[in-house]
């Protein structure tokens, strides 16, 4: 049962016919498996071919923003995913042959429940929601993206972290055969990220498995990636294979690479500039060549849900 | 010609500028500016190696192309990226060293472009030579500006740095020989 809002015409249907068909072909490999397993058994038997790429059972969320969403094309051709190349257009090109199934995720550390799980079993217990979030890159551009994902808070709680679990650490796949960008040390592989346990149990954080109601494309971090909309985009680690509950602040890739420029918290903040550029304004992708930059909001406009986490933290020193 | 292609891409005739056209234009103009500076710097070594004096006739034209692309790179930043918001522009020029470097390079190129005619060259005499030797500084500033701008992948600035080192090194070596 698909509950959808307002417009009956899905934005993905508006993209050109050629693009749409190519996209479906390209996703079919991973999507067929995912679609048939994510669908409840009754639906799986009779799902017609052209909605098999779709993720069924998506629930709407009050956290979604009503702002204009970026086009599927922009979201899937302008990516920072160095595992597939450092150019913005590289991931779409070089991740085409990447197979996100089979995929396993290991959960370890200070938690009551640990182990290694197949992706589909990992996702199954949770509601799949649509979260339309702003995404603000540290490079001072932003998009509005209709993610489909599961609540990280729900997931974290289900693994029963102990009182020693002060942080949640994430790790990406490390496989230079499948991820050609890892053959160069543009960053130390595997990509690592982390959140405090309070951040990880905030209702906004999700693990995204889809985009525009369909299975997540490779270049956006298939099959599963983190989305923390109040932080700079590099916190949104992609292609997650490990989640660890740890006691000490975990290393995070960009902070390790350039500690003076990228911090652990990375909260969006127009008042704390990057050493080499200002963070006061951002360019909204898709607004056109002559559109003005828009003012950046503290916590990317999500202060209502997250500001309380930082009331005692000096945001300038803990950038 | 790269400018023509950029305009073509802008309107979708020859391709596309991608999801972030401002950034793409900035990148292309900057790259072509650097390339033309390198090509201009390559004329003298080429002339010395091949003995073809007529190469010198192209140096001014190539230098002016370099100025043109660097100017476009700057105007793209000033008008389209910064929206001519002077407070933000001044802040960037003063507080972001890589932009200060780039701007200095532009100033030098402008000075050279304005004084590029034969008439002015004659009237300036030795002063003209001194001013136009600053093309070496422009090369260094340009590469440095690019290096300081990238996030982590220094491959491209590194390539330019190596080319520049070869072109400037050539002059150092040949000067020693003629002494």
Image: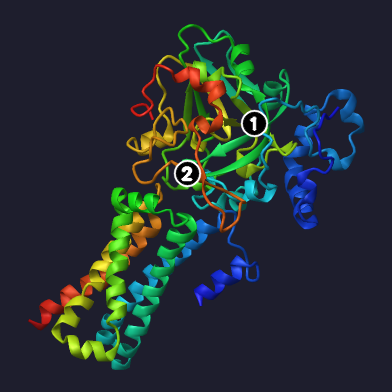
Tell me where residue A28 appears, x and y as whole percent: 77, 43
Q: Is residue A24 left or right of residue B134?
A: right
Tell me where residue A23 appears, x and y as whole percent: 74, 49
Instruction: In the displayed orientation, state which residue is furthest to the right.
Output: A46
Local secondary structure at mark 1: strand
Q: Chain of mark 2?
A: A
Where A171 falls versus B58 (above or below)?
above
Tell me where residue B166 appears, x and y as whole percent: 27, 70
The answer, for residue A255, to whether it is visible in the render is yes
Where A78 falls versus A36 (above or below)?
below
How packed mark 2 is, by other alpha carbons closer than 10 Å (few <14, some 14-19, many 20 or more), is some
Residue A281's tag is 2
The front one of A234 and B61 is B61
The front one of B94 and A181 is B94
Alpha-carbon span between mark 2 and mark 1: 27 Å
The quadrant in which residue A257 appears is top left
Question: What residue is disc 1 on?
Answer: A208
Tell me where residue A115 appears, x and y as whole percent: 59, 16
Image quarter of the C terminus of chain B: bottom left
Q: Chain of mark 1?
A: A
How packed mark 1 is, by other alpha carbons closer than 10 Å (few <14, some 14-19, many 20 or more), is many
Local secondary structure at mark 2: strand
At x 59%, y 43%, the residue is A143
The quadrant in which residue B111 appears is bottom left
At x 47%, y 47%, the residue is A183
The front one of B117 and A244 is B117
């Amino acid at each position: 049962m698909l509950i959808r809002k307002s417009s009956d015409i899905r934005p993905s249907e508006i993209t050109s016919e050629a693009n749409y068909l190519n996209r479906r072909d390209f996703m079919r490999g991973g999507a067929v498996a995912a679609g048939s397993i994510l669908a409840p058994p009754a639906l799986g038997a009779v799902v017609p071919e052209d909605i098999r790429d779709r993720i069924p059972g998506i629930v709407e969320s009050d956290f979604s923003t009503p702002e204009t969403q970026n086009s599927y094309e922009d979201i899937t051709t302008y990516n920072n995913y160095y595992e597939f190349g450092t150019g913005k257009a590289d991931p779409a090109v070089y991740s085409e042959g990447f197979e996100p199934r089979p995929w396993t995720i290991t959960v370890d550390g200070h938690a009551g429940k640990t182990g290694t799980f197949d992706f589909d079993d990992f996702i199954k217990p949770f509601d799949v929601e649509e979260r339309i979030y702003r995404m603000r890159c540290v490079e001072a551009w932003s998009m509005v993206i209709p993610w489909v994902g599961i609540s990280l808070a729900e997931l974290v709680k289900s693994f029963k972290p102990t009182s020693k679990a002060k942080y949640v650490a994430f790790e990406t796949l490390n496989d230079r055969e499948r991820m050609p960008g890892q053959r160069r040390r543009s960053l130390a592989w595997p990509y690592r990220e982390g959140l405090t346990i309070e951040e990880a149990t905030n209702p906004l954080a999700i693990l995204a498995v889809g985009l525009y109601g369909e299975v997540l494309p490779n270049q956006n971090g298939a099959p599963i990636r983190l989305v923390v909309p109040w932080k700079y985009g590099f916190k949104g680690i992609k292609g997650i294979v490990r989640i660890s509950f740890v006691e000490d602040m975990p290393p995070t890739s960009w902070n390790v690479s350039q500690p003076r420029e990228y911090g652990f918290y990375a909260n969006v903040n127009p008042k704390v500039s990057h050493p080499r550029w200002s963070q006061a304004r951002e360019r909204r992708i898709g607004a056109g060549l002559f559109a003005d930059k828009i003012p950046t909001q503290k916590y990317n406009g999500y202060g209502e849900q997250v500001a309380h986490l930082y009331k005692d933290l000096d945001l300038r020193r803990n950038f | 010609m790269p400018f023509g292609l950029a305009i073509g891409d802008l309107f979708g005739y020859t391709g596309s500028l991608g999801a972030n056209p401002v950034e793409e234009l900035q990148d292309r103009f900057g790259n072509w500016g650097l390339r033309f500076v390198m090509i201009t710097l390559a004329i003298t070594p080429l002339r010395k190696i091949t003995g073809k004096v007529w190469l010198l006739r192209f140096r001014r034209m190539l230098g002016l192309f370099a100025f043109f692309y660097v100017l476009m790179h700057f105007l793209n930043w000033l008008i389209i990226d910064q929206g001519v918001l002077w407070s933000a522009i001044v802040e960037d020029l003063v507080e972001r060293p890589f932009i200060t470097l780039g701007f200095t390079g532009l100033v030098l190129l402008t000075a050279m472009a304005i004084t590029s005619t034969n008439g002015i060259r004659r009237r300036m005499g030795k002063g003209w030579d001194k001013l136009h030797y600053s093309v070496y500084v422009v090369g260094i500033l340009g590469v440095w500006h690019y290096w300081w701008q990238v996030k982590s992948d220094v491959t491209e600035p590194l390539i330019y740095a190596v080319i520049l080192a070869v072109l400037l090194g050539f002059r150092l070596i040949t000067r020693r020989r003629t002494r």
